[in-house]
Amino acid sequence: MELPFTEPFKIKMVENIYKSTREQREGWIKDANLNLFNLKSQQVFIDLLTDSGTGAMSDKQWSEIMLGDESYAGASSYYKMKEAIKDITGFSYFLPVHQGRAAENVLFSVLVKEGDLVPGNSHFDTTKGHIEFRKANAIDCTINAASETTSYHPFKGNVDLQKLENVLKSNPREKISCVIVTITNNTAGGQPVSMSNLREVSELSRKYGVKFIIDSARFAENAYFIRLREDGFADKDIRDISREMFSYADGMTMSSKKDAIVNMGGFIAFRDEELFRQASTFNIMYEGFITYGGMSGRDMNALAQGLYEGTELLYLESRINQVSFLGNKLKEYGIPLLEPFGGHAIFIDAKKFLPHIPKKEFPAQTLAIELYTEGGLRGVEIGALMADRDPQTRKNRYPDLEMVRLALPRRVYTDNHMNYVAAVVRNVFERRNTIRNGVKIVWEAPIMRHFTIRLERIQ
Ligand SMILES: *Cc1c(COP(=O)(O)O)cnc(C)c1O
């Protein structure tokens, strides 16, 4: 028989987790104003809130921590990171930053001004936040197939080239800050973008004289899907695929808390020295000197090592197969899911799970609360709460997809944990008709409200 996928590592250190009672959880979630971000991690049994910064570092990464060079300027750790970035992405210039949104802040300080448009596939929430904070507009040009939750499309994260060209054609070039493509497309469900789509977006951007930036948090998972699903890549090395993806772009922002498997860190990389120079000034103001920019030397070392581990085929195979292991289990139980499964998470379709809860009562958040009280499972709402209000009209935005995301930390949970998770979701699914009402907002921040929102159950 064909040998199954397994993790290409074994466990050297363990962390105990606390299994609470339903009664405890009901009290805790109430005290947290029904906002799962407000829970203490000790109050959570299986934490699938995010795969960001929650991964387990390897023994090699921990060894690199001990070798960190904490010099203010010109640390060897900076050069180690520079070399790894050049090797894996092909970009010659880079700036370290403390995480992905800092990369956006620094880069957009150069590129984005008031009234600008920033077309791309569905922008990540912090990306959109940084654009809208500058009174510019993020234009979503994702293909329509992305909002059909059950249809098969191998690259649901793709940009609709016609939509993109319409934006580029009908606006003066000075009004377009840049084109941003997120790989994998997190907001659309961790869906990959094909190599040919990246190439075509690059050609269009060049035709209209606009810079093309890749939001690269999960570039390695994207490369894995290209290898798996796109003609001509089946035998290619993940790092060669990665270099080709980046070869089409002028620069990239990176949250290294994802595919570089570190708990903190990020960077911006550039092809062009001029853009790097302009961004350097903002990096110094917001992050730190250009050779550490918000990171300690040891963290830069671990990041450099993590870039190599995150682009190993066997690792990616086991990770993405763990995601589909959970997905298939849930599917077996009849849970409505976004398909095909993404790279880092399973997305439950809350509109179909709780069809009797109207959208203004936030069905995905309602479901996330139920999953927590049922089994101490923490997922996250990706729906109307996260979509915020329209910056002009201040009306709630209701995106096509109203989902609960269960994101898998890298190298942290076993398949037994996945079986537990699936059972929790199943139990809630079986009693879904007893969940009569959703939730209402009692307080919200003006931007990125979902992190700090306070909610109440509708009686
Ligand atoms: C996580 C993420 C970011 C922001 O990065 P942080 O490290 O959380 O600041 C930006 N874009 C995408 C696609 C992400 O997944």
Image (cartoon, rainbow, N blue to C red):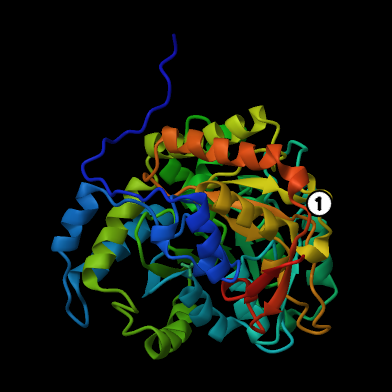
Report the front residue among 406 and 353. Answer: 353
Rendered-image quadrant of the N terminus: top left
* Residue beneath disc 1: 144
* Image quadrant occupied by the C terminus: bottom right
For the view shown, which residue lies furthest in the front direction? 23
Q: Residue 109 at x, y = what percent? A: 55, 85
State yes or no: Cβ of the residue under disc 1 lies below 8 Å from any atom of ligand 1: no
The residue depicted at 43 percent of the width and 33 percent of the height is 416
Q: Amino acid at mark 1?
A: Asn
Q: Position of residue 276 (x, y in %)?
A: 44, 78
The crowding category of the residue bearing disc 1, from other C-alpha atoms within 10 Å (few below 14, some 14 to 19, many at least 20), is: few
Q: Is residue 83 above or below residue 102?
A: above
Position of 41 with respect to 308 (left or right) is right
The secondary element bearing badge 1 is classed as helix
Residue at image point 46% right, 83% down: 279
Q: Residue 347: x and y, percent?
A: 64, 47
- The residue nearer to you, when weighing 58 against 50, is 50
Q: Residue at x 74, y 79 (%)?
A: 173
Percent from the top left, x then y, of residue 303?
Answer: 31, 60
Picture layout, residue 391 above or below residue 429: below
User: How many dots with numbers?
Assistant: 1
Task: State whether residue 227 is above or below residue 217.
Answer: above
